[in-house]
Image (tube, rainbow, N blue to C red):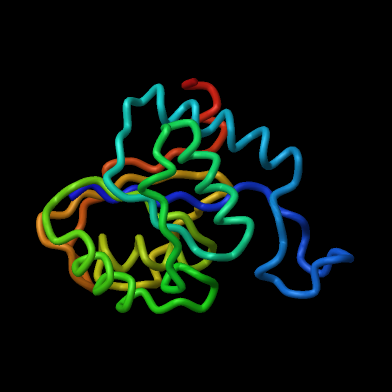
Amino acid sequence: MDLYILRHAIAEQRGSPGFARDSDRPLTAKGERKMQRIAEGMLALELAFDLILSSPFLRAKQTAEIVARVFDASNILELSDTLAVGGDPEELIAELKKRHASPGSILLVGHEPYLSSLVSMLISGDSELSITMKKGGLCKLTSESLHYGQCATLEWLLAPSQLTRIG
């Protein structure tokens, strides 16, 4: 299984007027433009996904929608509370195994520090490995048998600036 992990793009700051709930913060115009270029870079890498699973928080959902549009893959975009801020990574893994039992390619879109903690757990068995996922950053993990704990190999971790130069 190829597991791609994407942090949402640049969003409105926490506490910005008009966004009482954290889950309602949208991408900024700059975040949308940059995510478009990041998604084009992902396409240039010839990535492909069987499933795009996103946090339901607006900024992550918008990020996933941009990727889905660039990849012409809106039909495989789904939302999951297991990727929301405060989500449970063990429940996420169980959901992935249930939804996508056979090896394939999945893109997860979510938030920090959840994503770096998830990557750390899957590659080392410990959630405390220091990993920095910048907004719009993408990493690729591979796993023969996905489970909560050490089960994956980190293939690469790309900063958004690297992805925008690829496209």
In terms of depth relative to the viewer, which is nearer, 158 or 45?
Answer: 45
Residue located at (56% from left, 49% from top): 134
Residue 58 is situated, as x and y percent measured from the top left of the image, at: 63, 60
Q: Is residue 30 left or right of residue 166?
A: right
Q: Is residue 27 left or right of residue 61?
A: right
- Residue at 46 percent of width and 49 percent of height: 6
Number of callouts? 0
Give the residue at x 57% y 28%.
Answer: 37
Residue 64 coordinates in the image, percent (x, y):
50, 48
Percent from the top left, x then y, of residue 60? 56, 56
Q: Is residue 90 above or below residue 161?
A: below
Vertical comparison of 129 with 43: above or below: below
| Vertical comparison of 44 with 11: above or below | above
Q: Residue furthest front?
A: 75
Question: Residue, x 28% and y 51% (percent of image)?
Answer: 3
Q: Is residue 97 left or right of residue 86?
A: left
Residue 36: quarter of image: top right
Asked whether 29 or 143 is in front, the reply is 29
36 left or right, relative to 31: left
Q: Position of residue 96 (x, y in %)?
A: 26, 65
Q: Quadrant of residue 155?
A: top left
